[in-house]
Structure formats: structure tokens, C-alpha cells
Amino acid sequence: QLVINLRYLLMSCSLAQKVSEKLKFSHRLAISYFITDEIFGISSTVDGKLNPWYSYGAACVASPGWGLGTFLGAVVGNILPSNVASAMSVALYGMFLAIIIPPARKNKVIAVLVLASMAASALFTWLSKWIPLSSGMRILILTVVIAGIAAYVHPIEESGDNTNEG
């Protein structure tokens, strides 16, 4: 679980490049507290510097939704038949597709990274027959390697600072 959740560290490092260097520490801390997969997905597609108020607005919607969804999932999960509850796990994949597809359609680099990630994941799964690695370790290795290659090959170019630090 620890290895899988280390993705938030990588998301934080990525979003740190999108905020102004002048942004107060308190804003940086607050933004980092609310990072989820969904907020990372929408924040990483913002052109230019990331305004902290954009992140707060997203968190005002996402955080209550996350809490309510968790509560309802626990309640409904205990009511639904086990085969229906098991089928609901597909919804998670749908959510990730909803996060990935819009940016990939707008940016060819992201599209190539998504396809490369899928291919590398399939390769690592096939190689796991001979090289014993946990799924969490495979995810971590793939994330670091692919993100590192992407950062080296296509670094984010600095743009003008349009952040309102408020």
C-alpha cells in the first residue's frame, strides 16, 4: 500500500513545477494536502502557472465528493449482492480513463506516454513470470522510469507567471 501511494509524491513533484516560485509556503502546503488523482489530472492540464485558488475550488468539490462516495460505497457495498459489488470495480478504470483521455487528445506527448505506459505495464506483467516483483513495485518502477524519461525528453518549458497569490 505504501509503494502504491507513493504516487502522490510524484504528483506533488510534478505540480510543484506548475506553481509560482513566489507562492507562500502555506499555499503550497494546502495545495499538497488536497492532491488526489482527479485534482492532479485537472491541475496538470492548466496552461501556465497554477493559481492556488483553482486548486482550492477543485478541492471544495472533490473532497466532499470523495468522503460521501466512500461512505455510500461502504453502505451500498454491504447491501449489494457480491457479484454486483465486484462488478463495480470497473468504475475505477472508467474514472482513470476519464482523467487520461481528454489531456491525451489535446497533447500528443501525453498520448504517447499513455500508450508507452500501457505497453510497459503489459511487458512488466509478462516478465513477472521470471522476475518476481510485487504489483506495487512494478507500478513504482514504471512510474519513476517513464516519468523520468518524459521529463528528460520533453521538459516543461517555463512560461510567464500569471499566478494570483492572493
Image (spheres, grey):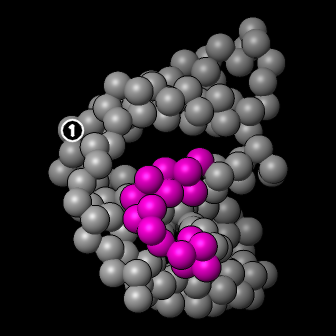
Residue 128: x percent and y percent? Answer: 71, 18
Question: Is 94 situated above or below 65?
Answer: above
Q: What residue do we see at 44% from left, 53% from top?
A: 17
Give the residue pinned by disc 1. 108
Please state if 106 lies on the left or on the right of 78 as rendered. left
Question: For residue 30, which quarter of the picture?
Answer: bottom right
In the picture, which quadrant includes the C terminus? bottom left
Question: Is 99 situated above or below 84?
Answer: above
Q: Which residues are magenta?
A: 10-28
Q: What residue do we see at 35% from left, 25% from top?
A: 153
Residue 83: x percent and y percent? Answer: 68, 64
Taking depth in this image into account, of 77 and 11 the one nearest to the observer is: 11
Q: Amino acid at mark 1?
A: Lys
Question: Is 53 situated above or below 118?
Answer: below
Crowd around label 1: few <14 · some 14–19 · many ≥20 (10 Å): few
Q: Is residue 18 magenta?
A: yes
Q: What residue do we see at 71% from left, 53% from top?
A: 5
**Residue 69 visible in the shown view:** no
Residue 163: x percent and y percent? Answer: 32, 74
Please state if 9 lies on the left or on the right of 118 as rendered. right
Residue 152: x percent and y percent? Answer: 41, 27
